[in-house]
Image (spheres, rainbow, N blue to C red):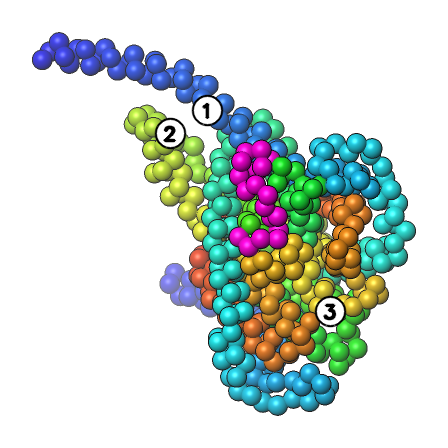
């Protein structure tokens, strides 16, 4: 009996092994096109960007360059422009992601509650998400235009920010930028959170109701903890996007009036000022900041990746 | 003492009665307020854009909610603008090619990740996913330099290649999670019947994965149509301008007299395909957005 299973096991293993090498060859074959594209256009350029950031290209003589070590980085760290962009980027990210979470959660709860027309609501919520970022910027720009715009009129009627040229003043310009971002991406947050709400089993709530928990108690001690994984993923997704923000300030203000961001100054140095070395250093710094957050992201969704990587 | 206890017992149901009817209308009311808020919040700005796009001349300096004299002039003028029409053509070509390539290359990779047994699968997936978080600015300068050397600067291919890189991680992730949901037994049956892996993939897995392909294709197309940073860095003429770049250039070219009417019309035109896609494929898009995000 034991011998039989051992033999069976061995045969099984041998069969698996022959499958295994075929499988591995096939896996390599199937994965290599994707890996080659990714390596060529992501990994190699990052290395090249790091190299460029250690050099200085002549603005006057095309193609002339010299190695300058970390000079570009010291220049960045001692410039007000860089710290201004860091401040704006983090301010923008912090406020817009927080607002998106609050509004997105509210929207998700309402959509979860609405039994009829949930499909219609989902479609409506997807409209801002589908609108191109630069179109969102244009829309909010026209809404805050001094004469054409409706928003300044409304605020004036409410006695807030009278006589303010929204996009022309520091602070106010950032507010419009945050508003445009919240409009476009709170729905994304809402749909991720709605999906999270839908996997919470209803009987947990029934049990809490029987025990006399109020709606607020149920929200605080059931909904929020069980929704936490979805909240975390949504927050990290949004944080990564917000830290990279480029299109919005580019179209809204061109980075003036306290709205310049890391991606935007790097881009300006690279294209308008043709400072390849310095611009690359700014790009690499942006990359490092985003990758640090991305590392947290990979750790958070590590369980998801592992379950995708699992057999079965 | 006993009387007190009896009171309390009697009082409890009364409290419940008083609260029950209140809860019955408070919650739906709150929900409906929220639903109205969602409708206005999500749709009004886009309505506003359409409203502005129907205005010309002096109407553009008043904030009416309805255009006083609606006209399609802005629309006819943008379609006479060669920069805009060639940008539309470029965007359609670039989006289609990138999406098709991402689906082909992505579904190969996803099939391997979902089905085949090999080592370090976790790390391969993690590496692929981390690419999707790369800031585009970090590769903009090197690619700009490289494309100048290879003659790919200001060409459609010069955009398709980096777009494919950024679209692949998302496509692979979505497709892998869709492939995993197809029962393995179906392919195994095909393999036992003598089909090769490729036949099993093409005849069994692909047809069943069609919804996943639609989802991944839609999200890829949305990404490519929307992308701005690389498009503005790697193009310099209408030969390769995509729609976001062309519309943003409307804004930049006349600093003092911004043609808001035509910009709005162009914005509406480039957004309508996406809004239609959302209406038609709402379920598929939501499935793609939430793929893997909620499993915890």
Can residue B44 be seen by looking at this rendering?
Answer: yes
Quickly name the residue at label 1: B27
Q: Nearer the viewer, mark 1 or mark 3?
A: 3
- Magenta stretch bounds: A154-171
Q: Which residue is mark 2?
A: A215
Q: Which mark is residue B234?
A: 3
Q: Chain of mark 2?
A: A
A170 above or below A13?
Answer: above
Labels 2 and 1 in the same subunit: no
**Residue located farthest toward the left when viewing the structure as drawn:** B1
Query: Within 10 Å of the Cα at label 2, are there few (<14), some (14-19), or many (20+) other Cα atoms?
Result: few
The magenta stretch spans residue B64: no
Q: What secondary structure characterizes most of the magenta part?
A: loop
Q: Position of residue B178 (x, y in %)?
A: 60, 51
Q: Is residue A133 visible?
A: no
Q: Earlier in the sequence, mark 1 or mark 3?
A: 1
Image height of A114 relative to B107, above or below: above
Q: Position of residue B186 (x, y in %)?
A: 62, 50
| Residue A129 appears left or right of B259 | left
Chain under numbered label 1: B
Secondary structure type for disc 2: helix
């Amino acid at each position: 009996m034991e011998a039989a299973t051992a033999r069976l096991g061995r045969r099984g293993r041998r069969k698996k092994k022959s499958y295994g090498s075929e499988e591995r060859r096939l896996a390599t074959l199937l994965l290599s096109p994707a890996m080659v594209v990714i390596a060529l256009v992501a990994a190699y350029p990052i290395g090249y960007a790091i190299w460029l950031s250690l050099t200085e290209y002549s603005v006057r003589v095309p193609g002339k360059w010299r190695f300058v070590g970390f000079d570009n980085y010291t220049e960045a760290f001692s410039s007000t422009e860089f710290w201004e962009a860091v401040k704006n980027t983090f301010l923008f990210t912090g406020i817009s992601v927080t607002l998106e979470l609050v509004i997105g959660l509210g929207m998700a709860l309402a959509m979860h509650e609405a039994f009829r027309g949930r499909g219609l609501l989902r479609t409506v919520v997807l409209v801002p998400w589908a609108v191109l970022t630069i179109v969102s910027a244009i829309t909010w720009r026209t809404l805050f235009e001094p004469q054409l715009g409706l928003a300044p009129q409304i605020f004036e009627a409410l006695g807030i920010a009278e006589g303010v040229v929204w996009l022309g003043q520091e602070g106010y310009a950032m507010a419009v930028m945050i508003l445009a971002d919240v409009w476009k991406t709170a729905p994304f947050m809402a749909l991720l959170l709605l999906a999270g709400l839908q996997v919470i089993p209803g009987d947990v709530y029934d049990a809490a109701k029987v025990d006399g928990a109020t709606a607020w108690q149920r929200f605080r001690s059931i909904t929020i903890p069980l929704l936490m994984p979805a909240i975390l993923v949504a927050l990290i997704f949004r944080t990564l996007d917000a830290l990279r923000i480029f299109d919005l300030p580019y179209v809204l203000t061109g980075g003036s009036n306290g709205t310049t961001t890391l991606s935007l100054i790097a881009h300006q140095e690279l294209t308008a000022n043709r400072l390849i070395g310095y611009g690359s250093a700014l790009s690499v710094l942006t990359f490092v900041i985003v990758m640090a957050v991305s590392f947290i992201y990979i750790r958070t969704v590590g369980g998801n990746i592992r379950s995708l990587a699992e057999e079965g | 003492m006993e009387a007190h206890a009896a009171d309390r017992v009697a009082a409890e149901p009364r409290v419940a009665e008083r609260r029950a009817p209140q809860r019955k209308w408070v919650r739906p009311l709150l929900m409906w307020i929220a639903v109205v808020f969602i409708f206005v919040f999500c749709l009004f700005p886009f309505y506003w854009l359409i409203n502005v796009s129907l205005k010309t001349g002096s109407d553009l300096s008043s904030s009416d909610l309805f255009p006083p004299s609606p006209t399609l002039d802005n629309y006819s003028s943008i379609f006479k603008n060669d920069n805009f029409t060639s940008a539309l053509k470029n965007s359609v070509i670039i989006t289609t090619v990138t999406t098709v390539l991402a689906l082909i290359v992505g579904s190969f990779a996803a099939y391997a990740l979902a089905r085949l047994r090999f080592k370090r699968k976790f790390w391969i997936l993690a590496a692929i996913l981390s690419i999707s978080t790369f800031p585009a600015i970090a590769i903009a300068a090197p690619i700009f330099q490289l494309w100048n050397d290879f003659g790919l600067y200001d060409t459609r291919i010069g955009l398709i290649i980096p777009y494919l890189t950024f679209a692949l991680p998302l496509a692979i992730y979505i497709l892998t999670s869709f492939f995993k949901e197809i029962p393995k037994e179906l392919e195994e049956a095909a393999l036992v019947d003598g089909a090769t892996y490729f036949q099993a993939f093409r005849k069994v897995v692909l047809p069943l994965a069609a919804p996943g392909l639609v989802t991944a294709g839609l999200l890829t197309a949305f990404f490519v149509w929307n992308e701005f940073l690389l498009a503005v860095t790697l193009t310099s003429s209408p030969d390769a301008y995509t729609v976001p770049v062309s519309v943003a250039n409307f804004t930049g070219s006349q600093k003092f007299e911004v043609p808001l009417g035509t910009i709005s019309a162009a914005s509406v035109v480039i957004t309508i395909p996406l809004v239609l896609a959302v209406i038609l494929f709402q379920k598929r898009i939501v499935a793609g957005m939430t793929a893997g995000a909620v499993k915890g």
